[in-house]
Amino acid sequence: MSSVSRGNILVIAPHPDDETLACGGTIVKRLRAGWPVKVVFVTDGRRAYSALFGIETDPTPEELAAIRRDEAHAAAAVLGLGHDDLAFLGIAEGALEGAPHPILLETVAQAIDDVMPVVELFLPHPLDGHATHRAVHALVTKAVAELALAPVLYHYLIWDEGAGEPLGDPVEIDIADVLEAKRTAIECYRSQIGQLSPQQPCPVLNAAFLAPFRGSPTETFWR
């Protein structure tokens, strides 16, 4: 059976880096097993420095968006993904606040429809502690329903503060044999794990936060 006839694996990332942190090892495993994997980046992450540090120049939000896009391409290459396996929707984070806008919903639905058939879909958990992640979950699940699709849904947690008991059945995927590739891909996101700006007091993601993603031989999802 060819990989095309088996369908696609689709990973939905609210920001560039979420795909690697949550699913990096799984992406490598699925690719090595012959499955085509596609990644959709919903937002461009341009507000990370302005929201956290009040930094509006060096880099500007536009410059940061371009940097994060380049980082996503570099991380994807480490994981084994090609340029055409990635889609960047470029939605501004503020646009995701409140009820899903029909245009945003249409954009997400079209991105999913573009990679049909989808047999497995990885998306943020509804209890993720980041508001943008929860908004993306709402958009994706609504789009899947409107498209009348029935892929296997795997929910991942990046920010689990206050999540309580995650919903659904946990599934652990063993990534011990590809963990080094995941670690290398994480290092591509220098804007998030390092100090890119002279005005920056600390990295966006500190070492303690990154430790489980860098060190765990498994990735956990909820179905």
Image (spheres, rainbow, N blue to C red):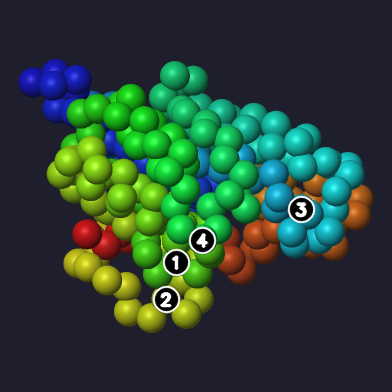
Q: CA distance from mark 4 to mark 2?
A: 20 Å
Residue matched to label 4: 98
Mark before the other along the chain sequence, 1 or 4: 4
Query: x and y percent of residue 85 in the render?
Result: 41, 24
Instruction: Name the foreground residue: 176 vs 61.
Output: 61
Front of the two marks 1 and 4:
4
- Mark 1 closeness class: few <14, some 14–19, many ≥20 residues within 10 Å: many
Are there few (<14), some (14-19), or many (20+) residues within 10 Å of tag 3? many
- Res 48 seen here: yes
Q: Which disc number belongs to residue 163?
A: 2
Element under disc 2: loop
Q: CA distance from mark 1 to mark 4?
A: 16 Å
Name the kind of residue labelled 1 in the image. Asp
* Circle nearer the N terminus (2, 1): 1
- According to the picture, the residue beneath numbered tag 3 turns out to be 49
**Category of crowding for the residue at label 2, using alpha-carbon neighbours closer than 10 angstroms: few (below 14), some (14–19), many (at least 20):** some
